[in-house]
Image (tube, rainbow, N blue to C red):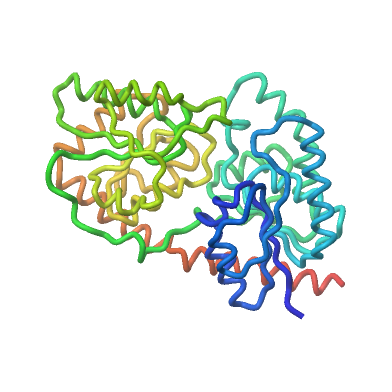
Amino acid sequence: MRKKLLFVVNDPAYFVSHRFDIGIDAKKAGYEVHVASHGGCPIEIFDAGLAYHKIKMPRKSRNPFVELYSLLSLVCLFRKISPDLVHLVTIKPYLYGGIAARLTGVPGVVSAVAGLGLMFSSGDFKYRLLRFFLYPFYRLAFCHKNQKIIFQNTDDRELLIKWGVVEKDKSVMIRGSGVDLRLCPYLPEPDGVPIVSFAARLLVDKGVEVFVDASRILRERGTVVRFWLIGKADPSNANTVSGAQLKQWEADGLVELLGFRQDIPSLFAQSNIVTLPSFYGEGLPKVLVEAAACGRAVITTDHPGCRDAIESDVTGLLIPIRKALALADAVEDLIENFGKRKCLGQAGRILAEREFAIEKIVDAHMRIYEDLLCKSEAMK
């Protein structure tokens, strides 16, 4: 009988962009693969022949009744499917899914901590209070007897170990969600006015305002450069920039708005520098991995997750968080020094081939699945 693997994610599009290759490889290996998420089934999941289950788990809900319903819906789904393994990705899925797995006796659990988000990166009182409230839920979600907890950076792992919710021997490091190197060819930089690209959700804590302020500083210096802002606002997030603000920045000539795009490697190939001045609770930003794979110099922050995606002064430059002047100086430095920029990009491609190739990431996950299944058989 085929083993059943169930992914639970908070957004089906996220599964397609960050976990799809793992699901496909698992299916090829003989697993019966299921995906559960909030929202409709993407065509990619349907075409791949993966079973899809729509659940009510809105990402930004804080209504306790909605949250309880999300937990109960996972309990019902787990009982219906009877998975041998559940792979729970991002905060709500690994919290509610971890608890549901214990309640329903799921034999093996993989919990993927893809960044800790604002709850841990912000010092605001409301987030400190939320951490206090959620502590017992983290303890419950991470205490399954046959479980592996995947971290993308060491800061997140150490934080949760010190917080007392994760046992060190359950933790596994896998650097990011990988990149298909075939889709990110290493091409020569284009000629013309240098282009600096930012690609992410347009949230304040992703560094959007820092990016725009750096553009303003360079314009005042007379530096000729184009700033591409790739992504869209997220109205469901209190930290989003507004549409009106975006239009004003564009009208002021500070940025060019490209909107939400799926051809990120193509856009990076047209760029000279990629930056992510984030101070968000990142895991390991995929956009920085894609930039490295495309052979582009990276400028990012000395912040958990971001600094883990590069080798400082080898594949990219690190700057302090919330420092537009530091970003402007780093951009100007790389614009004026083509040789340095090229060396960083070449080293980035080597790093991507060595650490971030999707085949290596998939293999690491498959080994975790096999280990958990072997242990669950031995425990019977």
x, y (%) of residue 353?
Answer: 37, 63
Q: Locate residue 166 relative to residue 247 in the image: left or right.
A: right
Q: Residue at x 22, y 51 (%)?
A: 343
x, y (%) of residue 48?
Answer: 57, 69
x, y (%) of residue 218?
Answer: 21, 25
How many numbered dots are placed on residues in this image?
A: 0
x, y (%) of residue 276?
Answer: 38, 38
Q: Locate residue 52 relative to residue 137 in the image: left or right.
A: left
Q: Locate residue 219 relative to residue 8 in the image: left or right.
A: left
Q: Residue at x 20, y 32 (%)?
A: 332
Find residue 19 and report its image quarter: bottom right
Q: Nearer the viewer, residue 371 or 287?
A: 287
Find residue 28 and report its image quarter: bottom right
Q: Nearer the viewer, residue 163 or 186?
A: 186
Q: Locate residue 144 relative to residue 168 in the image: left or right.
A: right
Find residue 183 and report its image quarter: bottom left
As drawn, which residue projects farthest toward the bottom? 1
Q: In which quadrant will I find the N terminus? A: bottom right
Q: Is residue 101 above or below residue 365?
A: above
Q: Residue at x 77, y 29 (%)?
A: 133
